[in-house]
Every structure is written in C-alpha cells, then in structure tokens.
Image (cartoon, rainbow, N blue to C red):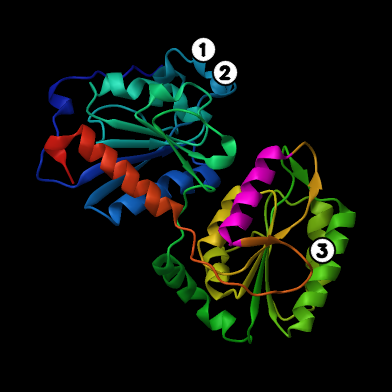
Amino acid sequence: MLNAPVTTEESLKIPSDRPLIVWAVSDGRAGIHNQVLGLAEAIAALTPTQIVVRHIRYRRLFDRWPTALRLWPDVMLKRDSDLIGPPYPDIWIAAGRATLPHSLRMRRRSQGKTLVVQLQDPRVPSGRFDMVIAPKHDEVKGDNVLPILGSTHRITPERLSREAVPWAESLSKFEGPFVAALIGGRSKSHDMSPARAETLVQQIRAAVKGKKATLLLSVSRRTPEAARAILTEGLKDLDGIIYEGKGDNPYFAFLNAADHILVTEDSVNMATEAAATGKPVHVLPMDARGTGAKFGRFHQGLQEYGAARPWSGELRTWKYTPLNETHRAAEALLALYNQTHPDEKR
C-alpha cells in the first residue's frame, strides 16, 4: 500500500527565476488528456512554462467509487498511476472524475500556493476550485466559472502544419478539394445503425463525386462494427485515404488538408477542433439514444458562431473566424493567476 505524500513548507517554496510550472492532469484517456494538455500548451504560448503531464488511475476496487467516498485517494491509485505529491505546481489543470479527489485537496495540500483549475462540469460546487472552465452547454453556475463554446484542445495552425508533414507525400497523390469525414460512434446519447451508415455512404459518395473531391475518412474505436464495415466498404473506391485505427493517426493531417470537414454530432471535441480550423464544418446526423439536450445546445452555439451547419448533403462553403476558446481560456487563467499570485506575476 502506498503512503500518502508528506507536505513540508520547504517543498512549497517556488523560485522566482524559473518558468511557470503547470500540471496537466487526467486519467489518460485521449479526449480528456487533450483538453488539459491543450490548455497547458496555450499557457505556454503566452509565458515561459514547464508542462508536466500527470495521469491518475484507480485500482479496480475503487474505480467506480463516488468522489465523496475516496477519502484516501493516494492509497487507492493503481501502480501505473502517477503519484501526486510535492513539490506542487503553480497551476493545476485537471479534467475528469478520476482527478476530483486530488483536485479538491490541492489548495490545502499546497497551502494555497497552487491555482486549482478544473475543466468540464465537476458536479460539485464550483467554489471548491479556484477556477472552473466548463462548456456553455453544461450550464455550470458560479462566480469563478468561465463558460466556453465546446472544449479546450490542442489545435493550432502551427501544430496542424507540423503534424501534416509526414503525410505530405501520401496526400500529394490526390487533388483537391479535400473532404475530411470524421466518424464517431456509440455513446450515452448517440449511436450509428447500419441504416444510418448506409444513408451517410450514399450522401457522402454523391457529394464527393459531385465536386470531384478527395475523401479523407477516419472512423473511431466507438464506431459500431456493422457501421464501420458499411462506411469503409461503401466508400473505399473513392480517391483518398481511409483510416481505420491502425498505424499512425492522420487526424491532424486530415484537418490541415481539408477544404470541408464532416463530423458526426456525437463528439463535442471533434466538432470544436474542426471549428478551430476556420473551415466549413458539416454536422452529420446520428441515431439518438437519449434527449441529447446538451448536444443540441452545443451545436446550436456552433451554428450561431458561424462555424457549423447541419449536413445538407451538399459541400457548401462559408467563412468565419477560427474558434479559439482555448486561447481565451488561457488568457483568463493567467489573469487570475496574476491577480492571486502578485509576487509571481507573469
């Protein structure tokens, strides 16, 4: 059994002649990891910063326990989890249920020296953190809540250009316009039936062939097997690249090359990342499994912003300023840090 870390005054001293120390904390799942790391990277673009990634994972016995019952979170962690001990960071950015027991204790453990920032809806009073950055569609309330459209992420023009380099030769074999189709799958609120997949195949085929375009198709781990087979088989004869999850992921290269982005309505992350490119985002319908009220509010927000429109079956073009909520969140976070830590002002 692991021992809880011991906090000492010496371990909390922060030298003034070094970069800001930011911990990006999650359970390691890609969607959540990219949110915390994306915000940390946005801070690093504004001020000298050292980013430290921390993954918190619980032993199976405790994995589904509610936050209130995880009274000794340090000794409940798996062996492959990162230990959470001093010296603590200047800024703690966390997301996901697994991080909550440590997030809720971080201000006390660091004796108030760490600014504690929680992403998404923590489902506990927001006042227990220094700042909560939550999607507008979650409707989280609190004086210290910064609502953003969608989620934070790692998409920047520089990153897209850099990540596209290894795929340049493969993409050079095709001619534009390029159509990126990003397919999600089954979740608590959405699903993709074989009938829905068949409809999408016919619509995408017609649109791509009509524009003499190149298709860049990516299916996810969540795409049901039957729907995956229908999509890949039905579209494989079109010019382009189909990524089914094996080998290097061309996701960033697809976003970089695309003239149009088609994204299924089940993923806030994918739609937000697509909107960060400034390219037309066509939202593909799926089969509903619940009310989908939150997703409805999110997609309405993207439409009102001007980034996205419901899929009409046509590759229409429109312009808008790339959505940059991650940068806005980073600026607000640093402003709060400077206000609450004047001796370490950046």
Secondary structure found at label 1: helix
Name the image quarter holding residue 255.
bottom right
Whole-angstrom CA distance, mark 2 to mark 1, is 6 Å
Q: Which residues are magenta?
A: 292-307
In x, y percent, where is residue 254? 58, 70
Residue at the spot of label 2: 65
Please name the amino acid that badge 1 sits on. Leu
Neighbour class for label 1 at 10 Å: few (<14), some, many (≥20)? few
Residue lying at 35% horizontally and 48% vertically, measured from the top left? 330
In x, y percent, where is residue 207? 78, 76
User: Does the rendering let one see residue 248?
Assistant: no
Residue lying at 59% horizontally and 63% vertically, measured from the top left? 247
Please name the amino acid that badge 3 sits on. Leu
Q: Tell me, yes or no, whether the two marked residues, 2 and 3, touch with CB atoms within 8 Å.
A: no
Secondary structure found at label 2: loop
In x, y percent, where is residue 96? 51, 33
Specify the principal SS of the magenta part: helix
In the rendered structure, the answer to whether residue 320 lies left or right of residue 51 reads right
Disc number for residue 200? 3
Please name the amino acid that badge 2 sits on. Trp
Residue lying at 55% horizontally and 61% vertically, measured from the top left? 275
160 versus 142 height, above or below = below
Residue at the spot of label 1: 69
Q: Tell me, yes or no, whether the two marked residues, 2 and 1, touch with CB atoms within 8 Å.
A: yes
